[in-house]
Amino acid sequence: MTIMVDNSPSEPMRSSPTAIDTISTFVGKLKKPILAVLLPLAFIAIWHFSTYGAYSLIPPPSDVAVALYDLAFGGIYDDAYSNTLLTHVLASLGRVFGGFGLGCIFALPLGLLIGRTPLFEQLLEPTFQVLRPIPVTAWLPLAMIIFGLGPSSAVFLVFLGAFYPVLINTIFGVRSVDNRLFEAASMLGCQGSAQFFNVVLPASLPSIFTGLRLGLGVAWMVIVVGEMTGVQTGLGAIIMEARQLSRTEIIIAVMLVIGILGFISDQIVMSIGRRLLAWSPSHV
């Protein structure tokens, strides 16, 4: 009788996860949020200890937290700022996304045309490159003359701030499309306008989304300047009024709100970009 011996390598037995593996996995998941809060906590600690002394001009973090709570919910100071945060946030959100939306409506098609068509490049790009370095603050008096006091001037200034990052990144994205993609598309019978929609637009989307993120960030930076145009509501309006009343704790509280709203807005755009650009290694 012949005995068959199986010499093939046996598959190693998989052991069940141990407690150490479970803990290491849990710690790994916590690593990113822990690292994200280390710098803010260190900053708050330095800020707290630097306010000790009789001549400190900056309020401690606790005063800012109290001011922020009263601004949001009221019940502490019961002054003109109490329980008004939502009204001002909604006003600023409308102006930020209104100006940002207008910037995208104009910047995206212009960027695609300038980046793809030599005629539009020669006709438009020099003018935009001359206007681009002019600060938004320099446009403030002219905006108030043209649009008057009120939200229209604020939306226009936000539009200017968001327009150029979207425009420049769109132009760059279109010009960066690999020529080999056009050759491959031509071999597959893709010609004319079909190349634009099937080659140029998808290949330039990563750069376009980078421009959208930058433009939205600048829009939040500009909103304070935009709301210096005589508007009665908005986060920038609170900062200007609090400055006149020397309410530094309110100024810092509103600055934190603007930062948080800008961060949330950026995360929304980034998550949309991840879904639409799952094929792009830089956006996975």
Image (spheres, rainbow, N blue to C red):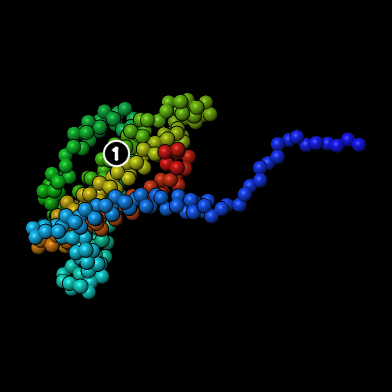
Q: Is residue 7 left or right of residue 75?
A: right
Q: Is residue 10 left or right of residue 110?
A: right
Give the quarter of the image for residue 261.
bottom left
Q: Residue at x 66, y 42 (%)?
A: 12
Location of residue 32 in the rendering, given as x and y in whole percent from the top left corner = 39, 49
Q: Residue at x 86, y 37 (%)?
A: 3
- Label 1 is placed on what type of residue? Leu
Location of residue 253 in the rendering, given as x and y in whole percent from the top left corner = 21, 60
Out of 143 and 261, give the one closest to the viewer: 261
Q: In the picture shown, does residue 50 fall above or below 188?
A: below
Location of residue 262 in the rendering, given as x and y in whole percent from the top left corner = 29, 52
Q: In the picture shown, does residue 203 fall above or below 150?
A: above
Quarter occupied by the C terminus? top left
Number of numbered labels in the structure image: 1
Location of residue 250 in the rendering, given as x and y in whole percent from the top left corner = 17, 62
Q: Residue at x 29, y 31 (%)?
A: 120
Q: In the displayed orientation, state which residue is furthest to the right.
A: 1
Label 1, on which residue?
A: 167
Q: In the picture shown, does residue 82 fall above or below 202?
A: below
Residue 10: in sight, yes or no? yes
Quarter occupied by the N terminus? top right
Residue 96: in sight, yes or no? no
Disc 1 packing (10 Å; few <14; some 14–19; many ≥20): many
Out of 173 and 1, give the one closest to the viewer: 1
Q: Residue at x 27, y 61 (%)?
A: 90
Give the quarter of the image for residue 50.
bottom left
Callout 1: helix, strand or loop?
Answer: helix
